[in-house]
Structure formats: C-alpha cells, structure tokens
Amino acid sequence: MLTAFTRAFRTPDLRKKLLFTLGIIALFRLGSVLPTPGVHVENLAACFDQARSGETGNIYGMVQLFSGGALLKLSVFALGIMPYITASIILQLLVVVIPRLEALKKEGQAGQTKITQYTRYLTIGLAVLQSTAFIALARTGQLFPNCQQDVLLDPDNIFGIVTMVVIMTAGTSVIMWLGELITDRGVGNGMSILIFTQIVAVFPSELANIFQANKFTFAIVMVVGVFMIAAVVFVEQGQRRIPVQYAKRMVGRRMYGGTSTYIPLKVNQAGIIPVIFASSLLYLPQLITSLFSTSDNMVIQWISQNLATGDTPIYMATFFLLIVFFTYFYVSITFNPAEVADNMKKYGGFIPGIRPGRPTAEYLNFVLTRLTAPGALYLGLISMVPIVALAVAGASQNFPFGGTSILIMVGVGLDTVKQIESQLQQRNYEGFLR
C-alpha cells in the first residue's frame, strides 16, 4: 500500500489527483467542526463531553458513527453521509420492486444517471427529515437527556430553527457534491472516501481515551484490532471464480469469441449493507422504550429489558440472525443468476460442464447460496465484537475496532489502493507503447 502511494506521488497527474482528494477531505472535516448558526457552542461542548460515553446507545447512534462525531456537535455537516447511504439503499430495494426503475437500470449509463438523480432528491428529503428531528431533540433537551443546559441560543425562535434545518440540509447537499468531485477529479469513489474519513476521524480520540483509562486494556484493544483487520482483509479478498468460456462465432468476416474468463463471486458479496440494515432495525426498540418509558405495559417492559440495550443474550442473538437474514436477502436482490445465465447464453458463453440457460442459473444459485453462508457468519461475528466487549469486559460502546467501522475502513482502503495501482499500470503500459 505504501509503495503504491509513493509511486503515485512520483507521477505528476496522479499526484494532482491525490492532492485534490486530500484538499476535499480537509474541507469536509472543516465543515464537520463548524457549528451551525444558532448553537450555543459552550453549552454544547459541555453537554457533548458529558454524553460522549453513552452516545451510541441512543437512537441516533448509526448517524453519529457516519458523521464522524459531528452530529452531537450540531455542525454544518452534522448529518454526515448517512442520508445519502439511506437513500442509496432505498433506491436499490425499489429497483427490484418498481418495474420502471428496473427498466432504467437495464438502459445502461443513461438509466443509471436517472437513478442517481432520484437518489439525490431522496437524499435531500431525508436530510430535511433528519435535521428537523435532531434540531427538535436539541430544542426540547432530548439530544442530551442528562444535560440541563440549553444547546440552542434561542429555542423559541422559529425562524432560527428553520435556518438551522436549511443549513444542515444544505450541508448534506455540499457533501454529495464533494463526493462527486472526488469521483470525477480525484482518486477512488468519492462517497466511500468521505465515509472512510468520517469513521477514521473518531479513532485517535477513542484510542486516547482508552490509553488514559487503562494502558493494559489499550494493548489488548490494539492486538484485537490488528487480528480483526487481518481477518477482514483475508475474507474481503476471498472469492470463488466461476470459469466461463465463449464459443467462437462469425460476425461478418470477423471471428469473435474463443476466450476464457471467470465470474468472481466474493465471499462477502453483500458488503456492509446487512450490518446497516440490522443496526437500523434494532434501533426501533430503543425508540419505542424512549417514547413509552413510563408505560406499565408488559410488552414495553420486556422490550426495554431485552432489546433496548446491547448487553443481553436476546439482543445479541437477534442482531446476529438479522445480519444473516439481510445478507441472504441483499445478495438475492443484487445478483440475479437467471439474468447472468441469459446474458452468457446470448453472447455464446458457457460454464464448462454445465449446459447454458436454466442449468447454468441453477448452478450459479447453488454456488452463491453456499458461498453466502460463510459470508453471513463472518459479518455476524465481526459485528458482534463491540457488543461482546461491552457485555463481557464492560468496555465502552465506542469500541474503536467495531465491526461496522473496520469493514468500512478496510473495504474502502483496499478499493482505493486497487484503483491507484490500476492507474499506475495503465500509465506504465502507455509509456511502453510510446
């Protein structure tokens, strides 16, 4: 990885792209610490320090994770990249349900551009809803339940509240724009780079807190973190390659085909999406208990005792099973064996030993189903690490090497390095041809 970056900085055009990407990241982090107008900075800092240890136990924990700590500071970029992630997931699900979106997806680049536009519109709508919800929580004092100080300068000024909502929504729009700038003029996928930045931003402070609290625990955390990173890299790189051969065919006076390739099926075909789905779904019990905290209903009390916190066996088992379920579900809607088999048959491709058409689709489904099993178990076990650490060792819920953060950091890091290496190889080939 270090060698790739060193070679990239020695290449003038790649160096410009890397410096441009770093400049966008710096601007992005500036917006993450810049307070929204109308926020009482001193009171907010005091409440933030008081609530830091318990922030992920609240309903907005996932947004706080993807905002790099900016949410509880009510900054201009407080919502982070979460509205875009949510909008992207919703559109991916709707593509399977709505025929019009499915037809757009099959149109190629033009259809994908249209779907991207719909994703932007939905992102703005979600940003308005989320910013309104968080400003309302701050106005009523529920953003920091244990803090009695006002975090807004004038909680009763409706114009000021609307201004804060507009600014935070505009911040989400700017984040989308910055991500697209990185994709077009920088290195790597822009949105992924920004997510990576937000996750990494909270690492130094969390490691420093652990080091100050207990140096022995810090050493254990670092060792566990190294092993987790190695395990994630090993599994993320793992794939099953299905060999495919294309028969020779005559088109006009030219002969096409006769080549061999493969279909790469990753062990973790679903990526991080199942963990986000499961985490978001399990925030609902926390929301229910917070809304009906004074209720004597037995169902509410059972939910409060077993599903509202992450240190109960029922919560752990539910979280693990939801990840397994969503892994199979997401793989089933993103990889269609029948469609792949039809495309292979259309262009004269076949898997050696398997007849084209339906037998090929059944074979791909057979392989994918069994390959998804270890991928689902891997996602479940990695995601359980911070929960088990909390229940067994009493560690902070801000465990820096949590499953979600590790999966994102390693995945984005590997993808960025691959893109840099591919661009370096492309330039070496161009130099050889000259």
Image (cartoon, rainbow, N blue to C red):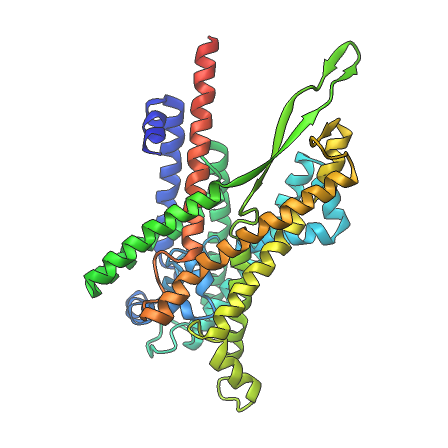
347 lies above or below 161: above
Front residue of 261/294: it is 261
39 lies above or below 306: above
Image point (74%, 34%), residue name = 343
Residue 301 position within the rendered picture, expressed as x and y whole percent measured from the top left: 51, 85
Front residue of 348/75: it is 348
Image point (63%, 46%), residue name = 368
- Asked if residue 186 can be seen in this view, the reply is no
Image point (71%, 51%), residue name = 96
Front residue of 8/239: it is 239
379 lies above or below 46: above
Residue 173 position within the rendered picture, expressed as x and y whole percent measured from the top left: 51, 50
Q: Quadrant of residue 112?
A: top right
Residue 414 position within the rendered picture, expressed as x and y whole percent measured from the top left: 43, 39
- Asked if residue 116 can be seen in this view, the reply is yes
Image point (69%, 49%), residue name = 95
Residue ranking furthest to the front? 353
The image quadrant where one finds the N terminus is top left
Q: Quadrant of residue 363?
A: top right
- Marks counted in the figure total 0
Residue 50 position within the rendered picture, expressed as x and y whole percent measured from the top left: 30, 72
393 lies above or below 352: below
Q: Is residue 23 left or right of residue 174?
A: left
Front residue of 339/173: it is 339
